[in-house]
Amino acid sequence: MANSPSARKRIRQTERRTAVNKARRSRIRTFIRKVEEAIAGGDQSAALEALRAAQPEIMRGVTKGVFHKNTAARKISRLARRVKMMAAGAADAQA
């Protein structure tokens, strides 16, 4: 256990940062889940809107240090590809 005052302070700071980061991570996961639910529901316009709302939120996680920038880019890329594939699937169904 930490004995010095500076070590105790670092523990308090870490607990606060952990709580903030956990809340941010949870918020980002909620935005991602909304996109995935819209994709699963087959509603392309809703998926596109959810993706547009999720992108800045995911990138905000990068600036706040919750995610690495490559992780965020990968998540956005994969979601965008899935939304785009919905458009291709809808076009195939109409043709």
Image: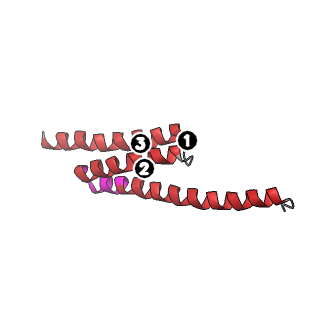
Of the residues tagged 2 and 3, which is closer to the observer?
Answer: 2
Where residue 78 sits in the image (x, y, percent)?
40, 41
Give the magenta range.
Answer: 35-44
Query: Decide: marks 1, 3 in contact (CB < 8 A)?
Result: no
Determine the secondary structure under disc 1: loop
Q: Residues within 10 Å of mark 1 (few under 14, many from 20)?
A: few
Residue 30 in the magenta stretch? The answer is no
The residue lying at 18 percent from left, 40 percent from top is 91
Query: Decide: marks 2, 3 in contact (CB < 8 A)?
Result: no
Identify whether 66 is placed above or below 16.
Answer: above
Label 2, label 3: how many angstroms apart (C-alpha)? 10 Å
Q: Residues within 10 Å of mark 3 (few under 14, many from 20)?
A: many
The residue lying at 68 percent from left, 57 percent from top is 14
The residue at which mark 1 appears reads as 68
The amino acid beneath tag 3 is Ile
Identify whether 80 is placed above or below 38.
Answer: above
The amino acid beneath tag 1 is His
The residue at which mark 3 appears reads as 76
Q: Nearer the viewer, residue 59 or 12?
A: 12
The residue at which mark 2 appears reads as 57
Q: Nearer the viewer, residue 45 or 89?
A: 45
The amino acid beneath tag 2 is Glu
The residue lying at 75 percent from left, 59 percent from top is 9
Determine the secondary structure under disc 3: helix
Q: Residues within 10 Å of mark 2 (few under 14, many from 20)?
A: some
The residue lying at 28 percent from left, 50 percent from top is 49
